[in-house]
Image (cartoon, grey):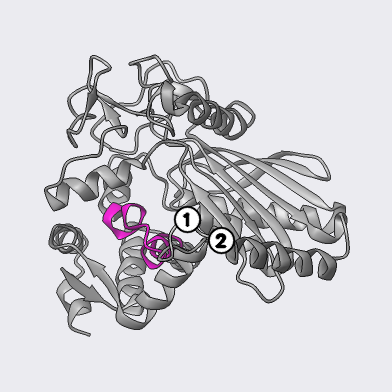
């Protein structure tokens, strides 16, 4: 384990994207989106995935110089073609379009096709907070998840994030996968040599397992809840909603046709759409009630929940976004911890692109 400052890690990551052929603006955005995951403690979606983006680019599944454009729109909606660009760049573009529409007509909703993995959902929803808007962010993902009662891999981890502005209290930021755990967390456990908890994955026969390599051996991830007795049907429904809003609505690949994040798995020869899909939304608070009134009541809502009686004296009631906010503060001060396996990956990535990662560790 080694701690590296945010600024050094961001500089290295930006240089990687530049060496891929991204513009300075896109490299800056992509590095910020990716590193936001590490800052917020979502290590499974940060620089640990950088190698995956490189492999997608090398296999010509990522276009480093995309022509991102609106292909259909109304005053409050749009469909965006990401031109096979990095989702880390395409999604912020789409959220900007959603916010511009919300400024004009109260709300803006954008569905995206022909994109790639977009990092953590929370980064994109939180962009709306700066404009006193409620932000929405969803994406479909590699088909690794089986619906309740199935052993076929038909859905992705399909996250949902909603960010809500406040006045004095920190904003309410929900950001969660519709599975019991994100795929990246299996990778983190594997690097640590640990087993997966029951309820995360099942084997190829649909039986519960703790094997972190279950996916490589034909198994699948499980919807939020883990099994029917713990309401996995609700996680399945949530994941389905994300898939439909992100892909069926936009013209992206949905369900089992969604392209895999790993480059060594082939794309299906019978696509039903283009690339991965996202769904972004922005709602202007004052389209519903005066913004200050709403934010005052959001503060009151948060304070009420935060001060509620706990089941144990050592517990405290958390508001969505609390753990990530505290982690961001800690890591901006003390640096971002990287596992040895991640350092090895970043070093190898650097060597491929003529960037000395060890120099960034020294600074």
Q: Going 48% across and 27% down the picture, which residue do you hit?
A: 231
The picture places residue 135, in percent across and down from the top left corner, at: 66, 54
| Quarter of image, res 249 | top right
**SS class, disc 2:** loop
Left-right relation of 337 to 94: left
The correct choice, above or below, for 278 with respect to 8 in the image is above
Range of magenta residues: 33-49
Q: Nearer the viewer, residue 121 or 258?
A: 121
Residue position marked by numbered label 1 in the rendering: 311
Q: Residues within 10 Å of mark 1 (few under 14, many from 20)?
A: few
Q: Which residue is mark 2?
A: 309
| Disc 2 and disc 1 in contact, CB within 8 angstroms | no
Q: Is residue 91 visible?
A: yes
**In this picture, is 151 found above or below 310?**
above
Quadrant location of the C terminus in the rendered image:
bottom left
Residue 327 position (above or below residue 112)? below
Q: Which sits in the foreground, 253 or 166?
A: 166
């Amino acid at each position: 384990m080694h701690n590296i400052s945010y600024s050094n890690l961001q500089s290295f990551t930006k240089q990687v994207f530049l060496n891929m052929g991204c513009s300075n603006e896109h490299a800056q955005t992509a590095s910020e989106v990716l590193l936001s995951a590490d800052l917020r403690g979502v290590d499974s979606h940060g620089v640990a995935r950088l190698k995956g983006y490189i492999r997608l680019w090398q296999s010509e599944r990522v276009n480093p110089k995309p022509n991102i454009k609106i292909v259909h729109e109304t005053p409050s909606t749009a469909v965006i073609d990401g031109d096979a660009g990095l989702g880390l760049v395409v999604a912020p573009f789409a959220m900007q379009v959603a916010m511009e529409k919300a400024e004009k007509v109260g709300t803006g909703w954008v569905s995206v096709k022909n994109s790639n993995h977009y990092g953590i959902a929370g980064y994109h929803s939180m962009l709306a907070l700066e404009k006193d808007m409620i932000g929405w962010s969803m994406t479909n993902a590699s088909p690794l998840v089986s619906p309740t009662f199935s052993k076929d891999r038909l859905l992705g981890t399909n996250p949902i994030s909603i960010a809500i502005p406040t006045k004095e209290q920190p904003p309410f930021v929900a950001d969660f996968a519709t599975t019991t755990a994100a795929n990246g967390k299996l990778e983190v456990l594997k690097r640590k040599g640990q087993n997966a908890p029951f309820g995360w994955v099942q084997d190829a026969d649909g039986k519960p397992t703790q094997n972190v390599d279950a996916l490589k051996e034909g198994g699948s991830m499980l919807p939020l809840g883990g099994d029917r007795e713990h309401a996995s049907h609700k996680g399945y429904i949530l994941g389905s909603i994300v898939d439909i809003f992100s892909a069926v609505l936009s013209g992206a690949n949905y369900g089992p046709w969604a392209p895999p994040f790993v480059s060594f798995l082939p794309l299906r020869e019978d696509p039903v759409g283009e690339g991965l899909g996202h769904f972004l939304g922005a709602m202007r608070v004052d389209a519903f009630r005066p913004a200050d009134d709403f934010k005052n009541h959001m503060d009151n809502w948060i304070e009420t929940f935060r001060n509620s009686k706990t089941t144990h004296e050592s517990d405290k009631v958390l508001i969505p976004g609390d753990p990530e906010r505290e982690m961001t503060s800690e890591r901006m001060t003390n640096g971002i911890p990287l596992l040895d396996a991640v350092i090895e990956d970043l070093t190898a990535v650097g060597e491929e692109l003529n960037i000395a990662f060890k120099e960034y560790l020294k600074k």
